[in-house]
Amino acid sequence: MNHAAIRAAAVGLFAALLCLTGCQGTTVRTSRVDPIVRDRTPLPEAELLDVGVLLFDPGTDGLDEDEAPEASKQIRRAESRYMPVLLADTLQKSGNWGVVRVVPSEQTITDLYVSATIRRSDGLHLELEAEAFDISGRQWLRRKYEETASKFNYDRDLNHGNDPFQGLYNRIANDLHAALLGLTSAEREWLRALARVRFARIFSPEQFNDYLTTGTDGLLGLQRLPADEDPMLRRIQKVRERDYLFTDLLQDYYQLFHRQMRGVYDEWRKDSYREIDALRLEKAQANAQIVGGAVALLGGIAAGVAGGDGFATQGAAIGAAAVGAPMIRAGLQRKVNVAARTANLGEMADSLNAEIEPHYIDLEDRTFRLTGTLDEQYAQWRQILMAAYREETQLETPAAD
C-alpha cells in the first residue's frame, strides 16, 4: 500500500471515530412547569363529569431486563399504581371535573376514563402515551406526552413540593379540559345520564336494556331516558351510592400507597437522574479517549510508513503507539464502568421494589370481608350489592293473591 493510500485510510478512520463524539445531540432542560388551566366560570353541577383514572399499563411487554435501568419491570409495576394518583390529584385540583377517582378497571362505571402506558421513566425522562374515552366509548384523546427533568425539578424549595414531572400531568389535564369545552351543555348532561343508565342495566338488565343502544360504530347510546321519579332507577341510585363507598375506600388505599412510595421513589429518581447524567458524561469521555488513542496510533503508523525504515522514524511510531494504546484501554475500561453503573441501577430498582411492594389490605363493610386483588375484591363487592338489591326488590314486591 502506498503512502497516499495509508493517509487516506487514516483520515477515513479518524472521521468515523470522530462521529463517536461529534455526532451527539444536545438536550435543553428547564424547570418550567406548564400551569393548570382552570375555568373562570365553573360548570353547573349537572354538567360536571366524574372521572376514573385507570391504573396505568407499565409498558413492560417485550422489554429485556438487561437492556436499560428504566426497563426494570419491578419499578414499572410500582409506577403504574403511583402515577395515576398524581394524575387524579391534578385533575381534581383543576376544579374542572366532578369526582375524580383512581379505579382498578372499567368495571367501575363513570362518565370519563383516563388511562396511560408508561413508555419511558428513568428520573431524567418521562414518556406517557395517554388515552381518554367516555362512557359511550368515544375517544377524547390519544397522545404521547414527554418531559425531560432538570436538577431544579428535584429541589423541593424550587418545585414547591410538586412531582418533578408535574408539568406533564398538567398538560394532560389541560388537553382533557379543552376536549370537555368542545362539548355542549346537553352533551355533558347526556353523558352523565348514560352512565346512570349503564350502571342500572348491570343490576336490572330486564328493566333497562331497552334504554340503551349500540350504534354501527360500536358506541353506546341512549334510546330514551327513564323518568326521574322511576322507582327502580331511584333504588339503583342507592346501590350506586353504596358502590361509591367501596371506590372511596380504594382511594384511601391508593393514597396510602402513594405516600409510602413517594419518599423512596423520589430518592431513587434523583439518584437515577444523577446516574444517567454520569453515564452520558462517561460515555462521551470514553469515546473521546478511544478517539484520541486511535488518532495517536494512526499518526504513529503513518509517520513510520512515511519515514521509511529510519531508526528515528520507527521510534516515533512506537512512541505514538505507546501513548495511544493506553488511551484506548482506558476508554474501554470506562465503558466497562458504564455497564457496571447500569447494573447498579438495576439493583436499585430491585431494592426499591422490595420496599414499596403493596400489601392488599382487607376491605371491610359492617358485615363483609373482601380479600384478594383489588379486581377480585371489587367483583366480590358487586356480588354483595347484587344480592342485596335482589333481596330488597323481592321484599318490596307484594305477594301474589
Image: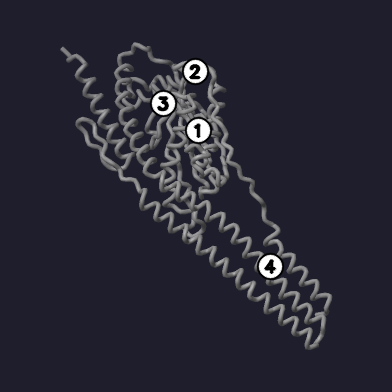
Callout 4: helix, strand or loop? Answer: helix
State the mark number for residue 291.
Answer: 4
Q: Give the side of residue 222 with respect to residue 36, left or right.
A: left
Separation of marks 4 and 3 at Cα, in angstroms? 59 Å
Separation of marks 1 and 2 at Cα, in angstroms? 20 Å
Callout 2: helix, strand or loop? Answer: loop
Callout 3: helix, strand or loop? Answer: loop
Residue at which label 3 appears: 99
| Residues at marks 4 and 3 touching, judged by CB atoms closer than 8 Å | no
Residue at which label 2 appears: 43
Residue at which label 1 appears: 132
Residue type, mark 2 in image: Leu
Q: Give the side of residue 397 with respect to residue 96, left or right.
A: left
Counting residues from the start of the chain, the first of labels 4 and 3 encountered is 3
Q: Can residue 26 be seen in this view?
A: yes
Counting residues from the start of the chain, the first of labels 1 and 2 encountered is 2
Residue at the (79%, 76%) spot, across then down: 6
